[in-house]
Image: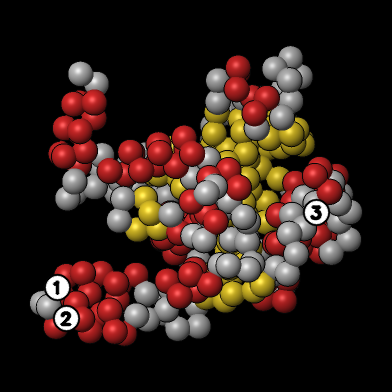
Amino acid sequence: MSSKVRIAVLPVAGFGTRVLPATKVVPKEMLPVVDRPALQYVVDEALDAGIEHIVFITGRNKGAIEDYFDEAYELEQALVTKNKTDIADELKRLRPREGTMSFIRQQSARGLGHAVWCARDIVGDQPFAVLLPDVIVKAANPSGPGCLKQMMDAYDDVGGNIIAVDEVPEAEVSKYGVIAPKGQIEGPLIAMSGMVEKPSIEDAPSRYKITGRYILQPKVMELLATQETGAGGEVQLTDAMARAMESGSPFHAFAYEGQDYDCGSKLGYFEAVLAHALDHPEIKDGARALIKAAQV
């Protein structure tokens, strides 16, 4: 039986250079998607999947993230005084239970692999999840399971390491890291033989791109401790995963049901706001009217 995944690591130390100048003083993870920061959607996905403790890997100028998940006593009291109890209740609902979040400073920008490794003392010898916080994954069914929950269900069946993927058009494979399947693809769970970063169309082993959600065994954390720098002069998580795969650690890709939005890019952020506005119970009708008017 597979060990339960209780801890999720969220690397939030990045500069957000693709959406400057907005991220000069506001962390990219805190950019609003309708009425809440992008990061809240990722945290909700983790909690809905059964994650019990979230480790944020932060950097300089990221204090707003820690403040966001803290109690805002004066604000909440002011809302109650003004009889805006529905908003006050929502803030209380979103506030995490005490002791369920940790914040670790990544003192130098040395890559995603190094950021994940910074959580080693909290993760220990347990399996753990990694969620890239600038990627929002919207469930195919609003009342259905999110991406990580779908992965957790698959993990209960096969264990090992699982990477979320979705299929992209052949013309777009060179933009992403894609997985190399082992044998015939049947169903959403795909045995992996490797990963290829931004292959040419001719050399791409599949059309399944890596999305930014992982369930990893502690072996990967051990390998990160000795992982040499790779692309961009940084410690890459994918390099450590490749080493784990070469040593015999089982890896599966999981083709989840849903749509991902890269909020670290201008267009991806706009797409995320648009998609969530169209589903928001308060503004969805107005959002559709605005879109229709813009098309005239």
Q: Is residue 237 visible?
A: yes
In three-dimensional space, the C-alpha distance between marks 2 and 1, rounded to whole angstroms, equals 6 Å
The residue that disc 1 covers is: 84
**Which residue matches tag 3?**
235
Residue count near mark 3 (Cα–Cα under 10 Å), binned few <14, some 14–19, many ≥20: many
Which residue lies most toward the top here?
A: 202
Q: Is residue 44 above or below residue 254?
A: below
Q: Which of marks 1 and 3 precedes in the sequence?
A: 1
The spot of residue 92 in percent (x, y) is 29, 76
Q: Quadrant of the N terminus?
A: bottom right
Q: Mark 2 Cα within 10 Å, few/some/many (few <14, many 20+)?
A: some
Q: Name the amino acid type tagged 3.
A: Val
Q: Residue at x 66, y 64 (%)?
A: 127
User: Is the Cβ of the residue at disc 2 closer than 8 Å to that at disc 1?
Assistant: yes
Residue flagged by tag 2: what amino acid is it?
Answer: Val
The quarter of the picture where the C terminus appears is top left
Residue at mark 3 to residue at mark 1: CA–CA distance: 47 Å
Q: Which mark is residue 266?
A: none
Quarter residue 254 falls in: top right
Work out which residue is located at the far left of the displayed protein and give it: 83
Location of mark 2 (residue): 80
The spot of residue 285 in percent (x, y) is: 15, 39
Q: Nearer the viewer, residue 4 or 265?
A: 265
Which secondary structure lies at badge 3? loop
Q: Residue at x 46, y 35 (%)?
A: 267
Q: Pointers 3 and 2 in contact (CB under 8 A)?
A: no
Quick check: 165 left or right of 39?
Answer: right
The residue under the point 53% across, 72% down is 63
